[in-house]
Amino acid sequence: MKPLTLFIAFLYGLSVFFVFPLIFIRLNSYFFLSVYSFLVLKILGVILIMAGGGCWLYCAGLFHFLGKGTPVPTQPPKNLVIKGLYQYTRNPMYISVLVILLGYFFFFGHLMLLTYLFLLAGFFHLFITLYEEPTLKKKFGKDYKKYLKKTPRWF
């Protein structure tokens, strides 16, 4: 992996999984919102975090081994990846991130983490529809257009 790609991936992970959740947790305290802390929710949170992380790593492996690239735009896959979880949804990595953040909400219990989850889901949708899909249509042409018709964007 190229140093720039590794750096971008690090910044993405740092901001999505640490900086922004911390900001939203602080906002939760600032607005005196409730915090829900129950053992069952914490266990569910850990399960979701682990499941989302495992799916994300699996998809990153597909990008590496089948796509001959990475999920990072500076080193995109050379081949269209449509196997594994990509048979069922075009965006399993984004879904995995959202599952991890739902796990954060259940584990930490701060309501503002749900706000972050929904804002990020909206951002992902806009990024996919305005940038990623048009870029992939240009790069992979009719193969990607066929994939669009066959596989749902989200579920």
Image (cartoon, rainbow, N blue to C red):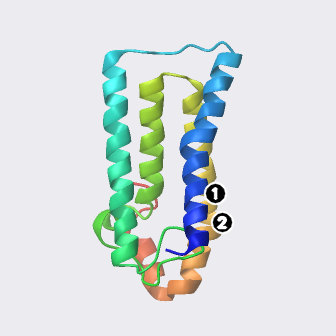
Along the viewing direction, whichever of 146 and 65 lies nearer the viewer: 65
Going by the image, does 136 lie left or right of 46? right
Q: Quadrant of residue 30?
A: top right
In the drawing, what numbered circle is on residue 126?
1
Residue at 36% from the left image edge and 58% from the top image edge:
57
Residue at 31% from the left image edge and 36% from the top image edge:
47
In the drawing, what numbered circle is on residue 23?
none
Quote the CA–CA distance across marks 1 and 2.
6 Å
Coordinates of residue 4 in the picture (x, y in percent):
61, 70
The reply to whether dot 1 and dot 2 touch (C-beta < 8 Å) is yes
Coordinates of residue 29 in the picture (x, y in percent):
65, 17
Q: Is residue 13 above or below residue 21?
A: below
Amino acid on which disc 1 is placed: Leu
Coordinates of residue 73 in the picture (x, y in percent):
58, 71
Amino acid on which disc 2 is placed: Leu
Coordinates of residue 7 in the picture (x, y in percent):
60, 63
Q: Quadrant of residue 84?
A: bottom left
Residue at 37% from the left image edge and 15% from the top image edge:
38
For this orientation, the residue located farthest to the right is 30
Q: Look at mark 2 in the image and give the residue it sits on.
A: 130
Going by the image, does 143 lie left or right of 129? left
Residue at 47% from the left image edge and 87% from the top image edge:
142
Q: Is residue 35 above or below residue 49?
A: above
Q: Is residue 101 above or below residue 122?
A: above
What is the count of numbered marks?
2
Q: Element at badge 1? A: helix
Label 1 Cα neighbours within 10 Å, binned few <14 / some 14-19 / many ≥20: few
The answer to whether residue 128 is visible is: no
